[in-house]
Amino acid sequence: MKLDQFWEYVFSEEAEKVRMAWDWLAEDERTSVRDHLEQITRDPDRIEAQRVAARYALRVVAVPAFTLPDGALEFARELAQGIGERLKFASGQLIASTKNDGTWVTASDIEADQRLAEAILARYPDHGVLSEEGDKVYRGQEWCWVIDPIDGTTNFTWGFPGWGVLIGLLYKGRPVLGVAEFPPVGQQLYAVRGEGAWRKTVTGYGDGPIRAASDKAFTTTQLYAVGTRSLKPSPPNIPCKLRLPGSTGFDFALLACGACVGVYDSTVHVWDIAALWPIIEESGAHVLTNHPGGIFPLRDGIDYSSVEFAVLGAATSELLSESLVRLSDRFALP
């Protein structure tokens, strides 16, 4: 590979090309290239598109080489589907209680969380499990599952169809596998880093690989998903039709499938986004948080119930650059 082709691949914002360029480097060359990319992300004299491309390349090469645990994808997909089927019949039938942080929880949240954790530890006893309703402290395990038994509990409680079961798998603190099951709409999204993002439906319609939209600029006819809290103190400066599904996972699923061109949520926890992270990136979309240093890799010994951050997603680098400008009053990279 020639040097000009190498840099073309690095800044291509295509994961496969970035990995090819990275594999071309000798081990001792990678540190200097990584340092150069990090300098670009902080350089105010660079145009935003260059900083976005550098951030994308750094995310791709940040995950060390891995081999999934035996049967992990099939296990996660079947587990999410099974739990989702059980939950579907309880949606709209329960009374929720309020947790200390002001969010809702139902008996189904707690039961589903326990079932998920028990199934994971029975299959992979050496793995960690981090969850919204269970253990919230990351303990530095090489492999750690991050689960949200019901993402969108308010929707679930009232019988509104925007909720799902989220199962993510981290390797050395970084997401490498994600499954998002949405029983009310009969769809499951899943991805493994480096292997693309996929959709499976109960009807078979729309099955196969998914890709984010290819739009380069915002228009008034596009859809843009936001979290409810993101409307305070005023709606975001986005010239699209705003949608409020009420579930971070559902929002980013819409982005990955190409239904929405962007997402902004001002108040997120790691279990809201871990499963969707590989799905988003493998679909070709972009995602950023305003957590100092980035939310991933997770840090050993941290109680993630106390870690809140904002998250921003866009279908293309052009839309991400425009989003960072338009949302500069409420979302700024540290």
Image: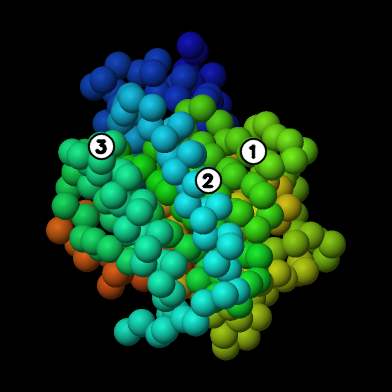
The answer to whether 310 appears left or right of 91 in the picture is: left
Q: Which residue is mark 1?
A: 200
Q: Around disc 2, counting alpha carbons within 10 Å, would you say few (fewer than 14), some (14 to 19), or many (20 or more)?
A: many
Name the residue rendered at 57%, 88% in the picture. Answer: 233
Numbered tag placed on residue 124 in the rendering: 3
At which x and y percent is residue 20? 47, 19
At which x and y percent is residue 166? 47, 53
Element at badge 2?
helix
Name the residue rendered at 49%, 13% in the picture. Answer: 2
For the question of whether residue 52 can be seen, the reply is no
At which x and y percent is residue 326? 63, 69
Q: Work out how far the residue at label 1 is from the one at label 3, CA to CA, in angstroms.
A: 25 Å
Work out whether residue 250 or residue 11 is closer to the camera in this orientation and state it. 250
- In the displayed structure, 148 sits above or below 58; it is below
Q: Earlier in the sequence, mark 2 or mark 1?
A: 2
Kindly give the residue lying farthest to the top in the view shown. 1
Numbered tag placed on residue 81 in the rendering: 2
The answer to whether 164 appears left or right of 118 in the picture is: right
**Which amino acid, by three-letter code, is at mark 3?**
Tyr
Q: How many marks?
A: 3
**Which amino acid, by three-letter code, is at mark 2?**
Gln
Q: Work out how far the residue at label 2 is from the one at label 1, CA to CA, in angstroms.
A: 11 Å
